Structures are given as structure tokens and as C-alpha cells.
């Protein structure tokens, strides 16, 4: 299986290229747990991340954004597609061949308390990855690196002998970031990394992530539901709805002129503090349909204010638009 | 007409190391009929505990130690347990952040609302059912007849919150307390629920206390707002005055740290440090150890109130001394 996984990178190839990624979860029923169908959590997603840049993956609960992140890292097995990291398809690698790539791709989760071992001290948490990848010759040397990393994420290095519960939520997230940075990754996946934090603490973490990116040239895949964070942080953005990317492109241009009705609704729904922001119309009606049984054609047609017959019957392809592409028949240049 | 609700010097404490630590500290506000008043602040600022105090639902070992809560001329803190039970749900109704934990998972949604109605009023089951279906329709639940028999787990988060709102409205309360009503919801569903609350206020003249951490939600819904920090109100006034021209350094920091408003590529404004735990709150201004405009005496002296135009009030030594514009 792994014989084909030879690097095919050229100078111009992006850091990460996801092609046709699909991750389905079986629905099992009955005594024999027979598979009766699939939840198409991720259904043919294409993404590109350039080195040192930030791609935001945005959408509401159940759209598949988290599954994309985990499928890229092979924390969840994908059903189909390719995940090319510097030209190597991670999905085609054997377990032992994957190991060196674990160092290059790291992840920071939403809930730092759930992702830090409560029985390990910060020093052990941060140095664990270094030991696994043979970074640092001795424990003393690794200890020095831990101190430097803690300082880098603005924690007191003297606190490395403490346990996670002795820190606040924001500080714990800093520990998670230090742990990820310890193995010198090239891509950091941030899965709702600032969503659970109060706004003043969120600002501290966003600034930290921004500083780290400028210093180390790290690329980010920023998975979030918060469009404010996307607008502030991301170079490019991909909007997901029920397992598919519905719109994708340069952040500023996309936010200024969203083409897909779902993106338009999502942007209009965000409460803003601007005096003009007080909306008087509801952007979209109804709930997101179940991903186990998505509507035919365009998945958004059941809630779309601009729906017409073709949307119910056919799945729109991604049409090129000014800032990127849009999966909506209204974006069809032939119209 | 006197205000619907007057809260004066409300102080709620919890025991710690042999003393009582105030988590709500001399909080005062008034609410007029038909207005939406927001209590906004970050985790642990005492906004939810203030709301629970209004209903006398402070979890033990906490208790209300001082202050008064006057609802339509009645002193809520002087009521008997039975009288208080009638106030809850009937005079003051509350909806919570997580509707799933507030609904009984083994009772159909409609029956739960019927129960709430019949607890407070002598009506037949059939009449209560009819009213419940009408309420479901009022709060925008599609197919209200079918949804009457649905169990909570069969409904989405947005629909469950609508059921909660229907239940809260079922006894025509004078005051609705909404504690982070949209925080657990997706942004498109959040917009729908905010719209519903706006409608209820417009059509029924509902008075609402909105508790939230989100200044965007405040901006869209509230007439007036009080910003809380570490158990105290630090600034209050009309929503537009407070958000567009904040006076307190904490409010200023809060508004400026919202990423949606920040220009790309520029560092976000940070409020240094973290909220200290209640046992370590300074005697004077609680924000003193994080404040960029701190003066020598801020940590020792409680700031006096400074009142500006349109009842825009702020508690800050630097503002009072004229050191902040």
C-alpha cells in the first residue's frame, strides 16, 4: 500500500493538499449490527493550505469540519480521497511510515482540560512528544526546551512542575500550544481552539497564535464556527455545509461579497455590536437536516431563500467566482 | 408607575476558609416594564448568580446576605417559601443556556408545558393542551400538534429552546430571565431565537433580563446594559452609549478585544492577566490589577459612581478624576 507513497512534491506544491476527502460513519441497526446506511460526515472535500498561511474551515455543528481535521491526521479513517502533505499521501502510508509526519502535523483541541493528562506535570506533558521523536539529547536538555516553550507561550517556566488543574482555561490552552510546538510542526490544526474562552482571554490566545505564525512560519488549519475569528485570522476560508465545501476563497473578498446563499445567511446571522448591525430579518429558517439523510441535490435547498427546481434535483459543482469558488447554480457563469 | 423590578445592594456570598466571600457584591439596578435589560460579563463575573438570586435559587452553601429585591412593590426576599414558589414561573420565568438539561427527558414536551400551566392555574387538561399548542405556534415550532407529543431528544437544540420559551411564557410572567439563551446554539439558529425574543417583546410587551457574555447579542436585543466584573456592576447605561462610548477601562477593553471588529493583520487588544478567584478580589476596584489606567489608590478604595448623560453610570477612579476622556 505504501509503495506508492513516494514524495511527488515540486517547488510550487502547497504544504497540504486535500483531494476528494470522504469520511463516512456506518449506521448500524439490529442484533447483528448490520450496516443500514452511512452518515456522510465528509463528502468529497478539497482543500489547499500554503506553507505559513491560515485556512479557516467554518460551519455549524454537524457540518463535518471537525471530521475533516481528524481525517487529515488519520485520527479517524477516511473512506476515500488523498491528503497530500508536501506531496506525500498520508492516507496511503503504513503506520510506521506515518510516524515522522505526526511530528509535522499537530492539533490543538477546543477543551484543553480534556486534552491534557491530569496526572502528568506540565513538564512531562510538553516533553512527551520530544522524547517520542528523539528531540533533545537528555532530560535536562528537554527541560530547558520546555522552559523556553513555556516562555514562548507566555507562561511562567517555574510552573512546569504544576498539574493542569492548577491553571486557568486560557493558560491550559497555552500549555496545549506549547506541547504542539515542542515537536516543531509545520502545520497546526486548531479545532475550535479559542471557542471555549472568554473574549478577553480569546484575544490573548489569538494574538499568541498570530505571533507564533509570524515567527515560525507555521501554517494553520483553523476549524471554527466563529466568523469573527475567521475574518481576523484567516488568509483563506472554506465554508462547509452538511459534509461539503459550499464556498471557498480569499477571506476578505469572500466576506465582502459572499456568493453562496448559505454563506450569506451565515454572515448575516452573526450578532454584531455595530449600531447598524441590528437585523430585523431572520437570515434562514429551519434547522440543519440530519447528515444521515441529507436532502437530494444541493444540501442547502431545504433552507435556501433562493431555491429553484434545479437545486432539488442536481448537485451543483464548484463554480469559479471572483474570490474562489461557490457550489451554487446561481454562480454558474453560463447562466 | 414605579419600575417593575428594583434591585438594591444585592449581595450573595459563599463560604470560604471560615468567611463569607461575596460573588455578587452590592449589585443595584431597576427594570422598567417592557424593556430588555442585559447583564453582560465574562465567566465568573456573577451575572448568572445575580439572576438566581432574583428567584432565590442560589445553590447552597451560597446565600443572599444583604440588599433588597422589590417586584411591583413586593419585597421578594421577605416572601414565605410558598409565596416564593408562586413567584417563580408565574411572576418571573427563566430560560437557561442548555435546554436539554432543563427539560425532563422522559416526558413529552407538550405535557411538560401543560404541567407548568396547571401548576399555576386551575384549568382543564384540554384547555391547557389547547393553550400549549397555541404557544408552540407562537414561538415558531413547526407542526405544533405533532411536536406536542415529541420527547425532548427528538427535537433539535433550537426547537428545545423554543419549547423552553413556550413553557416560560405559559403563565404570562411579568419578567422573563434569559440566561445565555443562544450560547449553545448555532449561529443561524441563534439568529432565529433572538428574532423570537424581539417579537415577544414587541408583541407582548415582555420585560426581559438577558444574561450573556456576548456584546453582539446585547447590541441586537437590549435597551440597557450593565457590565459586570468580579461580582460588581462597573458600568451601566443605554446599550448604544455603553458599547459605542464605553467609559470603564474594562468595558473599553472588552469592546476592543472582539476579533470581528479588529482590522486584519493588527494585534487584537488584550486585557492583560485573568479574572482573579473571588477569594483574591482586591478591596477597592476589582479591576485594579489588570487595569491599564490604574491609579495608586484603585486597589484600596471602592470607586464612587460617576453619572454622565442619559444615566450612563461608571464606577472608576480614573474616570472620576478626569484622567480618561
Image (cartoon, rainbow, N blue to C red):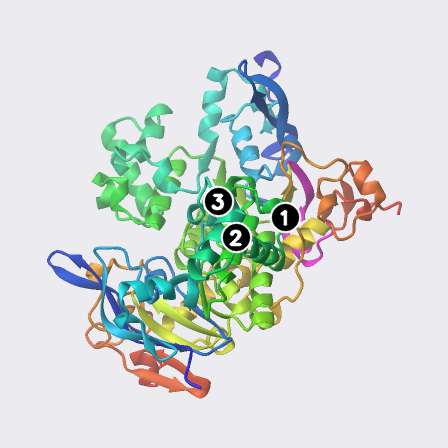
* Rendered location of residue B298, percent (x, y): 24, 75
> Residue B145: which disc?
1
From what the image shows, is residue B308 above or below residue A63? Answer: below
Residues at discs 3 and 1 in contact (Cβ within 8 Å) = no
Closest to the observer, A276 or A62: A62
Check contact, mark 2 vs mark 1: CB within 8 A.
no
Q: Tell me, yes or no, if residue A285 can be seen here.
A: yes
Residue identified by numbered label 2: B125
Q: Is residue A137 inside the magenta stretch?
A: no
Q: Are marks 3 and 1 on the same chain?
A: no
- The magenta region covers A243-260
Q: Nearer the viewer, residue B92 or B322?
A: B92
In this rendering, the label closer to the viewer, 3 or 1:
1
Near mark 1 (Cα within 10 A), the count class, few <14, some 14-19 or many ≥20, is some
Q: Secondary structure at mark 2?
A: helix
**Location of mark 3 (residue):** A192
C-alpha separation, residue under disc 2 versus residue under disc 1: 15 Å
Residue pushed farthest right?
A334
Amino acid at each position: 500500500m505504501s509503495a506508492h507513497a513516494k514524495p511527488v512534491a515540486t517547488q510550487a506544491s502547497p504544504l497540504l493538499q486535500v483531494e476528494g476527502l470522504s469520511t463516512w460513519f456506518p449506521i448500524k441497526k439490529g442484533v447483528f449490527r448490520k450496516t443500514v446506511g452511512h452518515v456522510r460526515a465528509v463528502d468529497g472535500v478539497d482543500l489547499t493550505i500554503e506553507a505559513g498561511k491560515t485556512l479557516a474551515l467554518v460551519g455549524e455543528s454537524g457540518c463535518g469540519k471537525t471530521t475533516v481535521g481528524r481525517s487529515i491526521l488519520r485520527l479517524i479513517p477516511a473512506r476515500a480521497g488523498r491528503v497530500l502533505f508536501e506531496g506525500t499521501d498520508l492516507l496511503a502510508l503504513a503506520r510506521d511510515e506515518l510516524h515522522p509526519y505526526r511530528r509535522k502535523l499537530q492539533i490543538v483541541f477546543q477543551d484543553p482540560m480534556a486534552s491534557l493528562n491530569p496526572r502528568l506535570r506540565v513538564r512531562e506533558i510538553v516533553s512527551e512528544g520530544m522524547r517520542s521523536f528523539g528531540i533533545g539529547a537528555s532530560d535536562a536538555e528537554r527541560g530547558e526546551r520546555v522552559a523556553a516553550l513555556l516562555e514562548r507561550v507566555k507562561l511562567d517556566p517555574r510552573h512546569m512542575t504544576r498539574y493542569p488543574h492548577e491553571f486557568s482555561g486560557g493558560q491550559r490552552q497555552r500549555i496545549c500550544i506549547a506541547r504542539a510546538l515542542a515537536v516543531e510542526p509545520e502545520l497546526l490544526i486548531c479545532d475550535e481552539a479559542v471557542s471555549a474562552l472568554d473574549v478577553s482571554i480569546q484575544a490573548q490566545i489569538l494574538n499568541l497564535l498570530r505571533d507564533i505564525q509570524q515567527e515560525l512560519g507555521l501554517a494553520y488549519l483553523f476549524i471554527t464556527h466563529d466568523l469573527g475569528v475567521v475574518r481576523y485570522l484567516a488568509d483563506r476560508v472554506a465554508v462547509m455545509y452538511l459534509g461539503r465545501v459550499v464556498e471557498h476563497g480569499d477571506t476578505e473578498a469572500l466576506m465582502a461579497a459572499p456568493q453562496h446563499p448559505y454563506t450569506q445567511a451565515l454572515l448575516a446571522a452573526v450578532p454584531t455590536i455595530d449600531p447598524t448591525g441590528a437585523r430585523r430579518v431572520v437570515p434562514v429558517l429551519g434547522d440543519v437536516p440530519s447528515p444521515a439523510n441529507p436532502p437530494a441535490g444541493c444540501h442547502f435547498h431545504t433552507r435556501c431563500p433562493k431555491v429553484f427546481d434545479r437545486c432539488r434535483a442536481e448537485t451543483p459543482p464548484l463554480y469559479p467566482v471572483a474570490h474562489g469558488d461557490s457550489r451554487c447554480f446561481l454562480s454558474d457563469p453560463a447562466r | 408607575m414605579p419600575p417593575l423590578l428594583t434591585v438594591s445592594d444585592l449581595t450573595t456570598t459563599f463560604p470560604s476558609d471560615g468567611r463569607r466571600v461575596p460573588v455578587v457584591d452590592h449589585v443595584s439596578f431597576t427594570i422598567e416594564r417592557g424593556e430588555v435589560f442585559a447583564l453582560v460579563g465574562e465567566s465568573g463575573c456573577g451575572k448568572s448568580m445575580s439572576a438566581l438570586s432574583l428567584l432565590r435559587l442560589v445553590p447552597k452553601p451560597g446565600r443572599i446576605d444583604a440588599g433588597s429585591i422589590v417586584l411591583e412593590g413586593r419585597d421578594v426576599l421577605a416572601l414565605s417559601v410558598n409565596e416564593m414558589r408562586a413567584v417563580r414561573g408565574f411572576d418571573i420565568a427563566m430560560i437557561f443556556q442548555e435546554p436539554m438539561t432543563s427539560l425532563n427527558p422522559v416526558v413529552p414536551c407538550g405535557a411538560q408545558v401543560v404541567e407548568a400551566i396547571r401548576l399555576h392555574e386551575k384549568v382543564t387538561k384540554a384547555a391547557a393542551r389547547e393553550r400549549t399548542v397555541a404557544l408552540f405556534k407562537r414561538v415558531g415550532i413547526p407542526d405544533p400538534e405533532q411536536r406536542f407529543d415529541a420527547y425532548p431528544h427528538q427535537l433539535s437544540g433550537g426547537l428545545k429552546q423554543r419549547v423552553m420559551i413556550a413553557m416560560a411564557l405559559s403563565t404570562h410572567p411579568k419578567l422573563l430571565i434569559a440566561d445565555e439563551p443562544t450560547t449553545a446554539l448555532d449561529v443561524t439558529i441563534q439568529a432565529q431565537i433572538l428574532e423570537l425574543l424581539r417579537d415577544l417583546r414587541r408583541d407582548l410587551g415582555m420585560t426581559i433580563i438577558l444574561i450573556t457574555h456576548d456584546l453582539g447579542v446585547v447590541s441586537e436585543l437590549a435597551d440597557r446594559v450593565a457590565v459586570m466584573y468580579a461580582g460588581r456592576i462597573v458600568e451601566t447605561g443605554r446599550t448604544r452609549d455603553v458599547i459605542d462610548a464605553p467609559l470603564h477601562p474594562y468595558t473599553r477593553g472588552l469592546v476592543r478585544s472582539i476579533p470581528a471588529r479588529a482590522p486584519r493583520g493588527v494585534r487584537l487588544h488584550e486585557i492583560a492577566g485573568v479574572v482573579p478567584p473571588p477569594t483574591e478580589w482586591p478591596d477597592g476596584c476589582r479591576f485594579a490589577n489588570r487595569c491599564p489606567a490604574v491609579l495608586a489608590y484603585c486597589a484600596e478604595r471602592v470607586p464612587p459612581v460617576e453619572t454622565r448623560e442619559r444615566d450612563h453610570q461608571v464606577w472608576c477612579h480614573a474616570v472620576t478624576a478626569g484622567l480618561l476622556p
